[in-house]
Image (cartoon, rainbow, N blue to C red):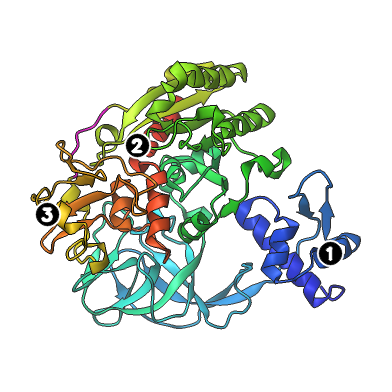
Amino acid sequence: MSNLTKKQKQVFDFINTYISENGISPTIEEIRKKLKLKAVSTIHEHINSLKSKGYLSKSENSARSLSLRKEIKSIIEIPILGRIAAGYPIEAIENVEDTISIVNPSIKTSEGYYALRVVGESMIDEGIFDGDIVVIKKQSVAENGQTVVAIIDDNEATLKKLYREKNRIRLEARNPNMPSLFRTDVEVRGVVVQVISNITDKPEKGFSKKIKHGFKTIDLFAGVGGIRLGFENAGFKTVFANDFEPQCKDTYDLNFRDSKLVVEDIRKIGIDDLPKFDFLLGGFPCQAFSIAGYRQGFDDEKGRGNLFFDIARILDARKPEGFLLENVKNLKSHDGGKTFRIIQETLENLGYHLKTKVLNSMEYGNIPQNRERVYMVGFRNKDYSEKFEFPSPIKLTVKITDLLEKNVPEKYYYNGKPLFEKLKDFIKEEGKVYQWRRQYVRENKSGVCPTLTANMGTGGHNVPIIKDKKGIRKLTPLECARIQGFPTHYKIPKLADSALYKQFGNSVSVPVIEAVGKQMMKAME
């Protein structure tokens, strides 16, 4: 590194980190913004210097065409202080017994870090197995959902997910066969920042299907990662994610360690910018086809309907094993069926065997939401397609009241606000969901939530309303996430409510996606 200037090293390190997290290189503009430089020409100078010194290569055919020719690694020695229980707590003893060498772009020095050997299997669903080593960042506080080293009782240490509840702290195990722990007093001694697998000791049963099969996916029109969650639960591995909405990146990147969200117009992403993948996943924009939108379809003046053809462009060039596409139910009937027929013919002409079905979240995901969506599953392999069957309906056992928050801020209540006078005589029963339809209140007779939409909370007429002990209020963003089936450990960033309502209204019902993904995996066994 002695032949590189400080600024050249910063450019190289950012490109290296970006490629490792996203699977593709950053654009010149993204490098400029990251390094807070005013002129693009300055970035070009640094890149040309890195090219001439043999660290980078660059093609002229794409905005994301940088690749590494030399790898600059900083090896850090982290002290191993002993063992940590991923199971029942064990006595906390800190003695430096060894060190472990790691390469992690976010860890510049060993100061403030330590490592522990894992004993037990309570965190296997988090990818942490008996015999693994976890690298810990020293800190005494942790956010909900982080994996922590917790000291409880008489100086006993355990590795668990931490969640603060009303009058206690829940230390959650990630193994359905092992209990979580509940305490009122917990000392946090750090959070897990890296897991180093002990491959030789890992039991065969510990591997999930995604490791066994290794099917890689790209997550297009990714939003906040609902489709990704479902497919990773089904055993697939995400290698690339893209969306056009910048605020989605705040939510997406908060919840996924790798393959961070690339914010870019899909029309500007070159074929060579994409990593190798087996399945394309995409809930392509539905506003052009939905009842809530203007149903302009391929003639949508914003060009959203035509984004389907960018999916076709990628399928044609890369010819992956298959795909899952999701859209509104009305896609099938739009323009007298012509729109859907064009989509179907396009996909079949690309060599795919297509199966489609409309699934309702309350019938196929055990989610109390009336959300009908059309799912399109395609395989190049005819045998896989013939074996594939959509999931069977399941009984709805989850109630809206199961998903509601206990302590809701006052800002969500209509009490004392002008609209309250129009609502109070119609919204009388707790446990039911109502809608304000601009001029009247509609009660949802089925006892489930109506379809969540992107215009919730922004003056739209589809705002779900409930009554609880304190009064009449609208659903919170967290409740909307739960009604879409997002897991309890899913993190919600500090964004404006309007942005969060839009994100979860635009998202998918995660359990339905997972059920479809598992059926796709089953068809290939």
The kind of secondary structure element at disc 1 is helix
- Chain part drawn in magenta: 393-398
Give amino acid for label 1: Ser
Q: Where in the figure is residue 394, as x and y percent of width and height?
A: 23, 32
Residue at the location (41% across, 66% down)? 494
Side of 412 where 334 appears, left or right? right
Lower position in the chain sequence, tag 1 or tag 2? 1
Residue at the location (25% across, 39% down)? 366
Give amino acid for label 3: Lys
Residue at the location (53% across, 82% down)? 112
Q: Where in the figure is residue 483, as x and y percent of width and height?
A: 28, 47
Separation (CA) of disc 1 from disc 2:
48 Å
Q: Does any portion of residue 420 appear in the rendered image?
A: yes
Lower position in the chain sequence, tag 1 or tag 3? 1
- Report which residue position mark 1 lands on: 41
- Report which residue position mark 3 lands on: 424
Using the image as rendered, state which of residue 422 and residue 442 is in the foreground. Answer: 422
Q: Report the label total.
A: 3
Side of 180 where 316 appears, left or right? right
Indicate yes or no whether the magenta region holds residue 395: yes
- Report which residue position mark 2 lands on: 512
**Vertical placement of residue 363 versus 128, above or below:** above
